[in-house]
Image (tube, rainbow, N blue to C red):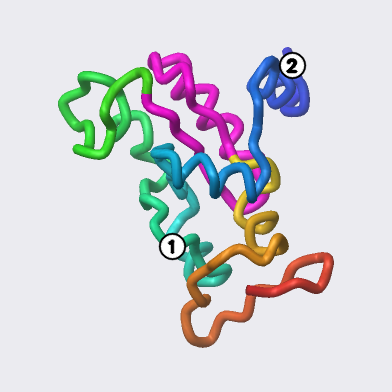
């Protein structure tokens, strides 16, 4: 048996995880930014303009190179993919799975959406009635 922390360390081993500003530059250069957070979480926290929304439960089917359920934005194994979750944990596991599928340039945003928002980068507003509060006092 291994712990979740050990699995997370394996998922991140040898992988460059870009921070918010580096992610923004990578997206400007053609990287695909994929937000895997569930709808309720996006409604509460807000989103990243231009991010492709693919919830975690269908991620592999939508991005599998050559897969029958692949979306048009998924161009193949050489495509740079940066996965985003709320804090950068689930996205590390998701990116590791994408690498196993052959997307060797898949990684995730270090710190997730919350790091992006805390860096002052553009976000969409949370849905009415939701106010995202972060531990450091930042909000979207």
Label 2, on which residue? 2
Residue 8 picture location, percent across and down: 70, 26
* Residue at the farthest left position: 68
- Circle 2: element type: loop
Q: Earlier in the sequence, mark 2 or mark 1?
A: 2
| Image disc number at residue 49 | 1
In this rendering, the count of numbered labels is 2
> Does 95 appear above or below 136?
above
Residue at (54%, 45%) from the top-left corner? 25
> Does 52 appear above or below 5?
below
| Image disc number at residue 63 | none
Residue at (60%, 55%) from the top-left corner? 113
Which contiguous range is marked in magenta? 79-108
* Residue at the farthest bottom position: 129
Q: Is residue 64 left or right of residue 1?
A: left
* Residue at the farthest right position: 136
Residue at (54%, 49%) from the top-left corner? 24
Is 123 or 10 nearer to us in this picture? 123
Residue 16 colored in magenta in the image: no
Q: Is residue 44 left or right of residue 28?
A: right
- Circle 1: element type: loop
> Does 36 appear above or below 113?
above
Residue at (60%, 32%) from the top-left corner? 92
Residue 112 picture location, percent across and down: 63, 49
Query: Pointer 2 and pointer 1: residues touching (CB < 8 Å)?
Result: no
Residue 49 picture location, percent across and down: 43, 62
């Amino acid at each position: 048996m291994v712990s979740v922390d050990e699995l997370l360390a394996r998922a991140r081993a040898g992988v460059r995880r870009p921070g918010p500003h580096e992610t923004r530059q990578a997206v400007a250069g053609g990287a695909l930014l994929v937000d895997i957070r569930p709808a309720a979480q996006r409604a509460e926290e807000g989103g990243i303009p231009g991010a492709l929304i693919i919830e975690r439960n269908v991620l592999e089917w939508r991005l599998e190179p050559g897969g029958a359920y692949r979306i048009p934005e998924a161009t193949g194994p050489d495509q740079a993919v940066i996965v985003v979750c709320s804090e950068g944990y689930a996205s590390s596991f998701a990116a590791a799975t994408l690498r196993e599928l052959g997307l060797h340039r898949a990684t995730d945003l270090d710190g997730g959406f919350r790091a992006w928002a805390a860096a002052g980068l553009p976000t969409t507003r949370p849905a009415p009635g939701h106010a995202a509060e972060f531990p450091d006092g930042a909000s979207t």
